[in-house]
Amino acid sequence: MKTPKYILAFVIGWILVDSCRTDQSADTATTDSLVTRQPAPTSPSFLVGLTDLCEQSQQAYMIPVKGLPAPATIPGLDKVTDTTAFLRSYLQTKANELSWLTFIALNWPATPNGTPDSTTCFGSRDGITVWEHWMPGKELFRTDNRVPKPWQYGLTAKGHPINSKEAPELHITKLNELSQFNPERHVLPDQYGNSTLYEVFYNRFMYNYIVGGKLYNPLGQEEFIKKRPRQPIGLTLIQNQKDTIYPEDLGRAFLPIGSAKDTTFDAGLGATLSYYQNVGSIMVKSAWTVLTANEDRSKYHTRTIKRDGNQVVLGLVALHFAHKLAEAPRWMWSTFEHVSNTPLVDKHGKAFLKPGVDYLYFDESQNDPSTYNKPPARERPGKLTGQQPVQIVRVEKPSSEIDQMNHQFRTLIAKANTKSVWLNYRLVGTQWPFSDPIPFNIKGPIEPALLANAVMETYHQGTSSCMGCHVKARFLGDTVTGKFADFVWGLSLGLSPKQKKTTKPPRTL
């Protein structure tokens, strides 16, 4: 078998292949008020093959696994002068469309066993979704050196997914604790003084790989590096028709990669690369807040949990998800937010307040730019309520193309249910690896360069990048000495009791 260095040598030449609220004003401000970093679409194409979220034959409940098309298949490419700009715009549109299609599939009403209920319309009811049946991070990455519990299907007697029992033990961001979700390590209170809560979920493909490779704690990770177990990754490389190359031989994790069909390609230098049909790895980051009597709960996806002996209703305020695909082996990164979270800033740096909107993270009566996006002066880490409210604004407006796409998808949702809670959520953006499908590369051009969710990357929106952060994820060491964690911070969360005393926990995912 050849060395990892040789593997990278022949794979490096591989080029892109094809495996493969009803009111528009909710997304649109005055035309001259906001700055947009993403380019306008050159030839947008929305809702291709999807026209009805009730029609079973449309299969909108299926998670899409065909990512970005090969450049050679893109219509009109041969008629433009600046092919790079055309590709960037066209593929960004396709990436955003894929984000929405995935959002619909993940948030589809689930059966008691966690599968999408294909007999009902999307948004026909607000209940437990498909991704809420997945494995929460606290159950997968252990701090007690135990094996994670088996993946289970079904509901508890109280109606919660078995994998997370009564509900996930949602994290509250704490100062100086990197194990919590918010990268800035500050509490994020809403206007009623309630802390934003966070939890991460992993799909079955990721669960199987992590448990099968014993990557859930450092002891198992050390064994993984020594024994390099062969994992079901959805990808193989065959060199000179005889040597099978495994990603584990590179001394790294390589999570399962999704593909629409079994496909084999000539990777050059006597090597072939094969993808196998499967959904691939998906991780979901969710952000919640307690909904008081002042909030219209009918506009939020909700969960009811017990906290300190009391029942509280949580409303979903934001959702991240990352999907590893053959056309995007550095993952496709998507982020959504509730339309009432925050206002945008105008060209003068002041919040643009839409009439009639009661923002959850902004007090409309106190519109002072000097207070924007600053952590609370007085923080009470670990407290669910009683925090000092903050003034949060979105500093980057999603592109006009995203506004248009949000409108069209919400029109589609309204066609299925005019009162669906999902009409109140919108796509912020999608980040993807630009023309770089080489499966073992960990760096390369990305689009857009920056992407932030105002309640996820609140205090550093101007410098936030999904891949720019996650490419630093390592296990069994820091960003210099550790092993590459395939963009998954969660692999560094499973600390043994001894390590917890001496090591600061890393950030999630």
Image (spheres, grey):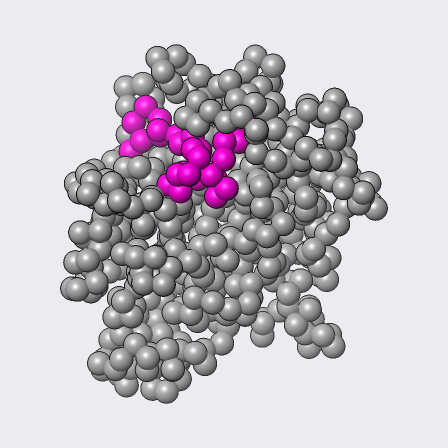
Taking the magenta stretch, the answer to whether it contains residue 308 is no
Q: Quadrant of residue 177?
A: top left
Residue 253 versus residue 151 in the image, above or below: below
Residue 161 versus residue 211 in the image, above or below: above
Residue at image position (42%, 20%) is 304
Judge left or right: residue 67 versus residue 48.
Answer: left
Residue 239 pos. (x, y %): 29, 82
Name the residue nearer the viewer: 449 or 40.
449
Q: How many marks?
A: 0
Name the residue nearer the viewer: 119 or 387.
387
- Magenta stretch: dominant SS? loop
Residue at image position (64%, 68%) is 87
Residue 322 visible in the displayed image:
yes
The stretch in magenta equals: 163-189
Quarter of the rendering occupied by the N terminus = bottom left
Residue 423 versus residue 40 in the image, above or below: above
Residue 486 pos. (x, y %): 37, 59
Residue 285 pos. (x, y %): 45, 41
Residue at image position (35%, 29%) is 169
Residue 58 visible in the displayed image:
no
Taking the magenta stretch, the answer to whether it contains residue 177 is yes
Residue 477 pos. (x, y %): 30, 57
